[in-house]
Image: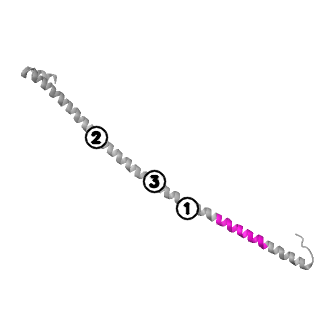
Amino acid sequence: PERVVARAEELLGREHGAMVLLLSKAEEEAGVLQDLTAEVRQLGEDLLAAQRRVVERQVDVAVGVGRLRRHALARTDEVFKRGWGAVDEANAAAVRREESIYKGMDEMEEIAAFFAHEGSQPDY
């Protein structure tokens, strides 16, 4: 630009040289602005791409959490079923033991009644 300004001053005078200098600076500023505009545009595109990736990841996480929640609920149901099954088995075993005890007590009463009828005492 210095040579262009000097040549303009030489041919057309000082005022024209100053205008050429201002025009040169304006063109330089316009180039910088174009570069900045392109950079801003690229940053905007990068931001949109990053936002898309974040949304996609959020969807993936939500799907994974849903899958885990369903699995956990299924496992919880399974554990409860097994637990209540064990409780039912324990209750049934307790009832069988109780019935066996009552049956044994009935047998002892029958034996005691037999010996009472016969007039002697059993040895137990």
Which residue is rendered at x = 33% and y = 43% of the image? 47
The coloring applied to the image is one colour
Disc 2 residue type?
Gln
Query: Toward which corner of the image does residue 99 lie, by quadrant?
Result: bottom right
- Is the residue 111 above or below the residue 64 in the image? below
Q: Where is residue 59 in the image (x, y as percent from the top left)?
A: 40, 52
Q: Where is residue 22 in the image (x, y as percent from the top left)?
A: 16, 26
Which residue is rendered at x = 86% and y = 75% of the image? 112
- Is the residue 38 above or below the residue 19 in the image? below
Disc 1 residue type?
Asp
Instruction: Say whether marks 1 and 3 touch (CB < 8 Å).
Output: no
Residues in magenta, as a range: 87-103
Quadrant, the C terminus: bottom right
Secondary structure of the residue carrying numbered label 3: helix
State the residue position of label 2: 42
Q: Closer to the observer: label 2 or label 1?
A: 1
Q: Position of residue 67 (x, y in %)?
A: 47, 56
Mark 1 and mark 3 lie on one chain; the one further toward the N terminus is: 3
Quadrant, the N terminus: top left
Residue density around tag 2, few if under 14, some if 14–19, many if 20 or more, within 10 Å = few
Disc 3 residue type?
Gly
**Left or right: where does residue 93 sit relative to residue 120?**
left
State the residue position of label 1: 77
